[in-house]
Amino acid sequence: MNWVNAVIQGVMLGGLYALFACGLSLLFGVVRVVNLAHGDFAVLAAYLALVVITVTHVPALLTFVIVAPLFALFGYGVQRLIIQKSLEVSPLTTLLVTFGLSVVIQNALLVFASADSHSFDLGRLTSASLQITPELSIAFVSLIIFFTAVVVLVGLQLFLSNTATGRSIRAAADDQEAAAIAGVNTRHVFGVAAAIAFATVALAGLALGTYSSFDPSAGPPRLIYAFEAVIIGGVGSLWGTLVGGIILGVAQTVGAQIDPSGGVLAGHLVFLAVLALRPQGLIRARLAT
Amino acid sequence: MLEIRNLTVRHGYLQAVTNVSLTLSAGETVAIIGANGAGKSTLLRSIAGLHRPHAGDISFDGRVITRLASHARVRQGLVLVPEGRRLFPSLSVDENLLIGTTSGRPGSWNLRRVFDLFPWMEARRREPTVHLSGGEQQAVALGRALMANPRVLLLDELSLGLAPTVVRRIYGVLPDLIRDGIGVLLVEQDVGQALRVADRFQCLLEGRTTLEGRPAEATPAAVEAAYFGLAARAGPAGAA
């Protein structure tokens, strides 16, 4: 039963990783930017939620209503004002710029919020769980995060496949110049893709603060897990991102079951195995087919 | 309608187009001919907003559009069918066509009318474009441009890589478009094809205009001289 439990907890954890990876996957698939500050933006969103809770006293679970739209606007701005400019210089510049943003965010948080770690208090929900058998239970918090990840990824897939904006995003991802001459305002479309990516990164930050805790330096490890989920699943496939997140989560919890300190290592080993044996990822697909 | 004045375009140190002027009226077809590297595609791409000119002006309906972004030019009715078709591989045939409406003008073109123009397309509208033959892809690229209800079509090497019968079929749709008042500016390596459909032509050599006029009035020898630069060697007066 311990093994079943490990797998189920791993699947739940995979939801959190998929939520983290979603924005990274979208931004890389569409704008061709590897956002090294991805994890730090998630942590920044969690801090923003703390401020929102302090100021408005809304329940922690509902802060996403305020934080996600704010982050979408922020993402549009960051894309148009910072990333787009660096894209037009060279791809290497975008790496340096996002790396710089990562350092700036971490240090700014240290200065303004101290190195203390925080987590969101959900009241009774924090310890509530779904009892499946006497030995097997799933925390409601994990379930909420997992279903949020599924809803976000399915919703994003449907949005890309079925709306005019989604179509423009896919066209610009395929061939930026051809999209421009066909009438697509590619800078705006990239801004919209970044807005969506940032809204999902905000959700991931809130999920992190509910699932465990965060501090100013919590971003970079999250970036690594998100990267691994994207690579395992296959770059450019949102379904792959979900699958990749789940595989990584299961590898970590099952690894920890074998040896309590070996969880993270097991995740990295699975990632390396996929990279060596199937570098294109498990699910090879273009963005939204 | 479209007027280009003394346009100079550079790629780094290379001057691809030098001091070229050109006009195009509604319902008129103008062909740009010239050898490989003569600057034809660069000229067309600059008109579509893909290259920023070093000097000179492009105006459309009396409005200077030299600094306008590509999608904003589409909104004015200036639409390029690019060399190599440049369809979107992850989009289906009808999604490719619908992209044309993103910044398109209102008008009579819609999916129905494109399917009437190319009847085979409707049955295959859900397929990815990579399943199509070169000629079929070219038809989709033309359809995508028409969906924007263009007033001027810029056609870059429509015939490239296509069988002669397919080329004839694609060019066969042009007269109907021109009757609607669409102006066509086309770039062709196939000089015979270009001169057959054009009202006027302009020959480029190393980025400069070496000959312009009406196909009926130009002798093959004069065109050949302008195309290969033989006249320039004989003396500058020969080019006129």
Image: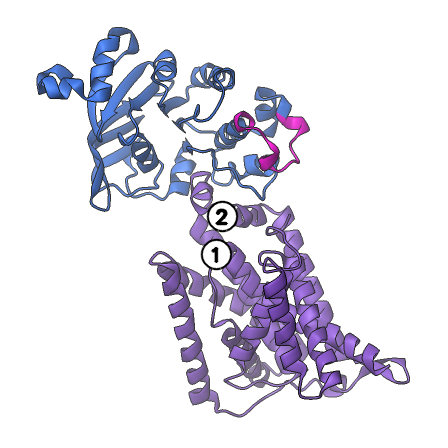
Chain colours: A purple, B blue
In the picture of the structure, the residue carrying the numbered disc 2 is A172
The kind of residue on which mark 1 rests is: Val
Magenta range is B121-136
N-terminal-most mark, 2 or 1: 1
- Alpha carbon separation for disc pair 2 and 1: 8 Å
Q: Report the quarter where the C terminus of chain B lies.
A: top left
Residue A31, numbered circle: 1
Residue A19 visible? The answer is: no
Q: Nearer the viewer, residue B166 or A203?
A: B166
Q: Nearer the viewer, residue B59 or B142?
A: B142
Residue that sits furthest to the right in the current view: A134
Residue A56 visible? The answer is: yes
Q: Report the quarter where the N terminus of chain B lies.
A: top left
Image height check: is A48 above or below B120? below
Q: Position of residue A151 (x, y in %)?
A: 70, 63
The kind of residue on which mark 2 rests is: Ala
User: Which residue shows up at 41% across the image and 19% down it?
Assistant: B181
Image height check: is B122 above or below A129? above
